[in-house]
């Protein structure tokens, strides 16, 4: 093939050409443009950060406020405070024909801080005219409920209360005083307060507080910007802090929820809480809380909180009985109770009080005349009382033990329970004085030392412990000798022997053997008891062996009856302890506490009716709801005729037996009792009673060395001293139907005509009574 064909047959490729773009390449942005773009993006980022951060902060604040709101509501609507346990003595009650003297009533009124006046104008006052006492009793919430203020007149005749007349001149069957508060048992907060409802605070006090501390209280919403600015201006002008800007609500928030730390964070919290309080609660609720919360001083280690307690702490009267100058003083102290302490800084405190009085007058709370009268009064503050917990520690220990059993829930107790007891202040004071004067006297007279004491009294009708001293150092708590010391009781066991016998075929004239005696036990040991005077009298009537506390007749009789039966009698009388059943128990070789003995003799004094001893009559919670009320359940454990004869024997003890010294001091009053002495004169006992009170006294040494005192020398001495300032009532027993009085021959122990030999008139069982006895 030729070159031409070759060329013509091949297809030629088109020539590729490059077309130049019509658009030119863009130039770089200028600096100004870049800066503008950066600002735009920065502002967008900042705005995004701002609103997101703001939203987060708002959410955090909202959550914090919700938290604060829950915290504030929980405490404000629940138990705002751990209130102290309040312990009260018994309320003095009056009824016609009551064995009572004017002096006893006046003594009680003075302990209640009533004022003796010539004309009664208000509650808390009394008037004495001749043999009448008119009392204007305060309002008080008893455990049965609140009783309003009332005026009544007591009319006396002889040794009794003849009648009670009300304000309208009508005779009434009963009246009573409010009880004395004997203790306030605090808690771990070391705060003490007396809660008072808002309507019980005097109007003058509330108005004075608002004028001085927060004039616009009912207008602002918890925080007052105007007050803050005014305070800031005053402080800048003075160059120091002279005025505060906090409202009452803020002060309550600070005291109630916050610490005393001074910082911006705390002030912010204070404002938030104040706003929440004001939003959630009424002004009256906030004011009531403030009046009960405000700190007004220190009582030993307890802070005094609230106007109610401060009124008692400084003036010994309820807040509704305060005078204008006293109200002004409490309001003045709100600014600084330490700086304006009337006990330490009377002059500066009076200046502040006078300023408050002036503000009260300028704002029409009191008149000009009232202002001048109040201004002239000096500050009169009650002496700082002993700590109530140190006043009666022995008695309060008994109360506390019973409280733990009756109200085991500590939350209920810490919410402010009120305990009403059987405590009688007059008896307690007489008991303490008897011990204070009596023990040194006994140590000097009988050349002994280191004596200790346990003493208590019991109300026979209620089985209520009315007074108790647990040791010589009666203001110190610690070992309670009444409840926890167990010592040999000596002859105090003998009434149980004679009661066991009189429950059977024995009578008070029955002859018992007082001859030498030996008892050999299973181990071969011989016991030979003796009388205290080491003499033997042969056959003696039971009443004489009883009253003279002869040992041999008691042992012979006890062995004849059976030691186990005597021990069972003691158990039935209420002794809650293991009682040994060996023969020496018949002479008191059994260790019992004073409380056991008191239980035993109370059952005898109550004519054989047993009821467990207690110190508490009632318990209420902080709202007045009854938690417990003591209702004595009397169980008749012994035949009334047997107990009547046993009580006769105990009466003879005080007339002609080992306790006859009692008759010399109280010849016109029938009393009963029994002395007791343990081996080597280690323990001196006396258990005695009048018509309504059983008292047990023990004297000994903690180291169990001889006290060198018999029951008649030692314990009886304290009992006599105890009774003297009181008004003991003679025992007036009703004769049971199963008893007749008859003459009994002392030598034969048989009923006889009055002229038939040496006779004595004794109570006998009716079935043994012979209306026409012979001389055989």
Image (cartoon, helix red, strand yellow):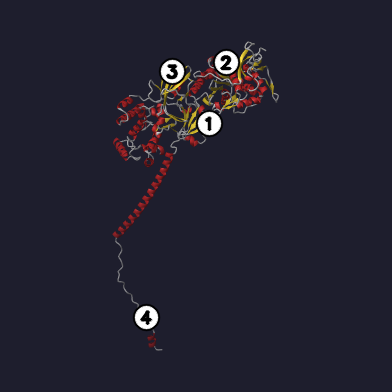
Q: How many marks?
A: 4
Q: Could you give the CA–CA distance between mark 1 and mark 3, rounded to whole angstroms?
A: 41 Å
Q: Could you give the CA–CA distance between mark 1 and mark 4, rounded to whole angstroms?
A: 124 Å
Residue 646 occupies which quadrant of the picture? top right
Q: Nearer the viewer, mark 3 or mark 4?
A: 3
Instruction: Read off the residue under disc 1.
Output: 402
Q: Is residue 747 above or below residue 243?
A: above
Q: Which mark is residue 131?
A: 3
Q: Could you give the CA–CA distance between mark 3 and mark 4, rounded to whole angstroms?
A: 153 Å
Q: Look at the numbered disc 3 and give the secondary structure of its residue.
A: loop
Q: Is residue 767 visible?
A: yes
Q: Is residue 89 above or below residue 653?
A: below
Which mark sits nearer the N-terminus, 2 or 1?
1
Q: Which mark is residue 317?
A: none
Q: Is residue 289 above or below residue 321?
A: below
Q: Which mark is residue 13?
A: 4
Which mark sits nearer the N-terminus, 3 or 4?
4
Q: Label 4: few (<14), some or many (≥20) within 10 Å?
A: few
Q: Could you give the CA–CA distance between mark 3 and mark 2, rounded to whole angstroms?
A: 33 Å
- Quarter of the picture containing the N terminus is bottom left
Which mark sits nearer the N-terminus, 1 or 3?
3
- Quarter of the picture containing the C terminus is top right
Where is residue 253 drawn, in percent x and y? 39, 38
**Residue situated in front as seen by the camera: 313 or 1:** 313
Instruction: Read off the residue under disc 2.
Output: 655
Q: Could you give the CA–CA distance between mark 2 and mark 1, rounded to whole angstroms?
A: 38 Å
Residue 537 located left or right of residue 175: right
Residue 733 located left or right of residue 12: right
Q: Nearer the viewer, mark 1 or mark 3?
A: 3
């Amino acid at each position: 093939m030729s070159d031409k064909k070759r060329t013509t047959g091949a297809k030629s490729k088109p020539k590729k050409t490059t077309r130049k773009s019509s658009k030119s390449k863009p130039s770089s942005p200028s600096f100004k443009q870049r800066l503008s773009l950066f600002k735009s993006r920065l502002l967008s980022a900042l705005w995004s950060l701002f609103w997101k951060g703001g939203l987060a902060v708002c959410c955090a604040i909202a959550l914090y406020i919700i938290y604060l709101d829950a915290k504030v509501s929980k405490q404000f609507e629940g138990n705002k405070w751990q209130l102290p346990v309040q312990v009260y003595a018994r309320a003095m009650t009056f009824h016609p024909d009551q064995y009572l003297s004017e002096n006893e009533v006046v003594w009680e009124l003075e302990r209640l801080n009533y004022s003796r006046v010539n004309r009664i104008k208000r509650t808390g006052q009394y008037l004495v005219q001749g043999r009448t006492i008119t009392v204007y009793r305060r309002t008080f919430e008893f455990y049965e409920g609140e009783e309003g203020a009332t005026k009544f007149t007591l009319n006396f005749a002889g040794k009794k209360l003849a009648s009670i007349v009300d304000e309208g001149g009508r005779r009434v069957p009963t009246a009573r005083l409010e009880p004395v508060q004997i203790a306030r048992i605090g808690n771990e907060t070391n705060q003490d307060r007396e809660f008072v409802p808002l309507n019980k605070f005097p109007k003058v006090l509330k108005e004075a507080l608002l004028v001085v501390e927060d004039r616009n209280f009912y207008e602002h919403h918890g925080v007052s910007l105007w007050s803050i600015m005014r305070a800031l201006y005053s402080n800048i002008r003075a160059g120091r802090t002279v005025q505060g800007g906090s409202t009452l609500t803020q002060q309550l928030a600070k005291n109630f929820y916050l610490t005393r730390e001074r910082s911006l964070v705390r002030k912010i919290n204070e404002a938030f809480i104040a706003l929440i309080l004001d939003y959630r609660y009424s002004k009256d609720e906030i004011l009531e809380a403030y009046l009960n919360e405000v700190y007004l001083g220190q009582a030993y280690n307890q802070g005094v909180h609230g106007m109610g307690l401060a009124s008692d702490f400084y003036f010994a009267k309820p807040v509704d009985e305060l005078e204008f100058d006293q109200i002004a003083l409490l309001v003045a102290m709100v600014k600084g109770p330490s700086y304006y302490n009337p006990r330490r800084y009377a002059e500066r405190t009076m200046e502040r009080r006078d300023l408050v009085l002036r503000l009260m007058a300028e704002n029409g709370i009191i008149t000009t005349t009232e202002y001048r009268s109040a201004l002239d009064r000096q500050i009169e503050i009650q002496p700082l009382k002993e700590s109530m917990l140190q006043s009666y520690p022995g008695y309060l220990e008994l109360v506390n033990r019973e409280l733990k059993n009756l109200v085991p829930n500590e939350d209920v107790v810490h919410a402010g329970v009120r305990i009403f007891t059987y405590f009688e202040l007059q008896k307690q004071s007489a008991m303490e004085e008897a011990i204070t004067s009596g023990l040194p006297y006994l140590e000097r007279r009988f050349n002994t030392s280191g004596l200790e004491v346990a003493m208590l009294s019991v109300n026979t009708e209620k089985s209520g412990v009315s007074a108790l001293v647990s040791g010589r150092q009666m203001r110190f708590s610690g070992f309670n000798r009444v409840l926890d010391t167990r010592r040999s009781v000596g002859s105090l066991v003998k009434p149980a022997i004679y009661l066991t016998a009189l429950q059977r075929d024995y009578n008070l004239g029955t002859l018992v053997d007082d001859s030498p005696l030996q008892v050999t036990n299973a181990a071969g040991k011989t016991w030979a008891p003796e009388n205290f005077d080491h003499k033997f009298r042969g056959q003696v009537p039971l009443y004489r062996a009883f009253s003279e506390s002869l040992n041999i007749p008691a042992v012979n009789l006890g062995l004849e009856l059976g030691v186990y039966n005597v021990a069972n009698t003691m158990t039935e009388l209420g002794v809650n302890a293991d009682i040994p059943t060996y023969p020496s128990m018949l002479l008191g070789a059994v260790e019992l506490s004073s409380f056991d003995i008191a239980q035993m003799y109370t059952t005898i004094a109550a004519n054989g009716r047993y009821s467990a001893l207690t110190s508490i009559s009632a318990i209420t919670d902080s709202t007045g709801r009854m938690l417990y009320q003591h209702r004595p359940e009397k169980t008749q454990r012994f035949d009334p005729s047997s107990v009547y004869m046993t009580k006769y024997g105990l009466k003879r003890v005080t007339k002609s037996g080992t306790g006859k010294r009692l008759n010399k001091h109280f010849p016109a009053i029938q009393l009963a009792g029994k002395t007791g002495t343990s081996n080597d004169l280690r323990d001196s006992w006396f258990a005695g009673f009048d018509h309504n009170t059983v008292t047990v006294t023990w004297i000994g040494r903690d180291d169990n060395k001889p006290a060198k005192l018999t029951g008649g020398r030692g314990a009886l001495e304290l009992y006599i001293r105890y009774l003297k300032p009181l008004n003991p009532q003679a025992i007036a027993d009703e004769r049971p139907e199963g008893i007749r009085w008859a003459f009994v021959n002392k030598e034969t122990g048989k009923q006889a005509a009055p002229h038939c030999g040496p006779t004595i008139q004794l109570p006998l069982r009716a079935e043994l009574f012979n209306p026409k006895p012979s001389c055989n």
